Image (cartoon, coloured by chain):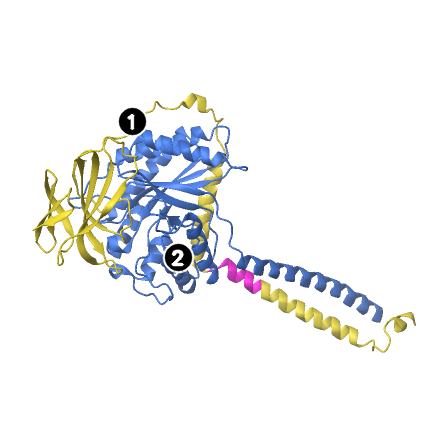
Amino acid sequence: MNRQTQTPGKPQHIRPHFAGLIISVACVIALFFLIGGAFALGGSPLSLQKQQGLQKLEQQIAQARTPTRPKNVANLGVPPAQSLVTPQAGITQTHEGPFPASFFLVRSLWQGPLGKNWVLAYAGAKPNPDGTVQQGGILLYTAPRNAPMGSDLHLVGMFLAPTGATALTIVSVSGNLLHVRADSGAVLTFDLQTHQYQP
Amino acid sequence: MRLTLRTLARKLCVLVGVFALLSTLFLLHGVQTAFAIAPKPPTDWSFYMFTPNSSQAYTLGCNQGHFDKSFNPVVDSEVVLDFGGPSGPGDGTLNYSAIESASEQFALGYYVCTGADTTSVVTLGLGTNNSADVTYNDGVTWAHTVKAVANWVSTNAGQVVIVGANDIEPGWSSFSAAKSWVQGFIAGGGSFYLNFGSADGCPPYSTGNGLCNNGWNQDDVYYVGWGAAPAFATPEIYNTTMPLQWSMISLYGKQKYSSPIYFQGPWDEYDRDTSTLTQQQAWNDLWTDLNNNSLPTYMPYSLEIHLASW
């Protein structure tokens, strides 16, 4: 009686149906999460391989965090301070500078003293957005003379060769003149002081 | 019987209600994180070190140790020392002995200068690049170099994990040459390398295995950045296009191989060029572009390149 009073006008036989509906909805939701979980875990061989790789890397980090012996750095000591490497003047065949390849494509580097500065002249080319050579040129940096290699560089500028010259490579240096050869075969001279090309 | 059914239904209602509530909270949490950029971890300094110097490397490692232990709780870090490209015909020759020594001293400096902090760990990548005529043998040699340093560290220091690293850029070599390096690295026993390169020329808005610079395509960049077993990536993020390109490569991997890239974190160069994205901008842009494409935003580190020597 009391129950009937508590739910006036509501037929009792609806409740089991309602419960069944809720159970069905719950099942759908559970299935949704089950599938989602399986998808999230990923099943491809590559995915599993990479997950194992990540776990292995994290294990190595965890192992490094767990010392196998007492840490006594006093015994290790700090090595005596040494002066940084003094840069050596000359030509280096290299392809990388302290800048991205999308900024300048390097073919060679000359570095040496010039006046009160240490000069770095990267020969190569300015690239197109697609990475191909747009125009040959020289990228100049300076650092204080006698400064250690860790000193920061000052960008002087990018000096593009006359139109038509492709990527440049340094051939030789005489005084403040940089002799370069373009891929096209043209030979040019670049004045490191005036920043001008001579034919 | 009727009573039992009602009791059962009532219990189920409560159960389903709790389930629904938890599900709603879970979903709401997901929605909330979908729009909030995760905070950037401390940015670690990597270095161009074209002339390896042990004393300088020790100081740099020590600096990183001081940095990591200055946090409460202390933090881990990831650093790459970029020693330049392997020698091709006419190229300058890499001094592997000097590279090993400098890397070891960086590790020792880190270990010593973390002092009483015994839990911070730096993942140190020994970096090279794929310029010029990079070869299979270069990859083998690099793996051996990494292993030699790792062995030394396990005996003489701690709190450092040594891995390989490679500034792999499409413009610097053919894909086949870069792939040869990767295969050589694997054959030489290399377990991990961090690709801190670029995806120059790759499509920023499509995933149809589009062309990148120098004849590469998205599948190629994906391979050297994630698809190869030892590959992990901390991509160069210098401008707003680069995170789009990397996001599309990750999405390409997700679609084709069911394996999106889990990036280690963005690599910026603001210290070298203030016209490029800052540490925070690089982080935000990469995180946002990944998130916008429902890709993993797991990024434990933030890295920035500096100049140690030229």
* Element class at badge 1: loop
Q: Where residue B279 is drawn, which disc sits there?
A: none
Identity of the residue drawn at 41% across and 33% down = B63
Name the image quarter holding the C terminus of chain B.
top left
Check the image and name the residue furthest to the front. Answer: A194
Identity of the residue drawn at 24% across and 36% down = B95
Check the image and name the residue furthest to the right. Answer: A1
Q: Which residue is mark 1?
A: A83
Identity of the residue drawn at 51% across and 60% down = A40
Q: Which residues are magenta?
A: A34-43
Query: Which chain is indicated by disc 2?
Result: B
**In the image, B223: left or right of A181?**
right
Q: Where residue B243 is drawn, which disc sits there?
A: 2
Main secondary-structure element of the magenta-colored stretch: helix
Can you give x and y, in whole percent of width and height, for residue B91 in the image?
Answer: 18, 43
Query: Which chain is indicated by disc 1?
Result: A
- Relative to residue A118, is residue B3 depicted above or below? below
- Relative to residue B57, is residue A22 depicted above or below? below
Can you give x and y, in whole percent of width and height, for residue A136 in the image?
Answer: 17, 53
Q: Nearer the viewer, residue B63 or B146?
A: B63
Q: Nearer the viewer, residue B27 or B163?
A: B27
- Relative to residue B260, is residue A158 depicted above or below? above
Q: Nearer the viewer, residue B80 or A40?
A: B80
- Relative to residue A103, is residue B292 depicted above or below? below
Visual hue assigned to chain B: blue
Check the image and name the residue furthest to the top. Answer: A75
**In the image, B2: left or right of B275?**
right
10 Å crowding of disc 1: few (<14), some (14-19), many (20+): few
What type is the residue that disc 2 sits on?
Answer: Pro
* Magenta span contains residue A38: yes
Visual hue assigned to chain A: yellow
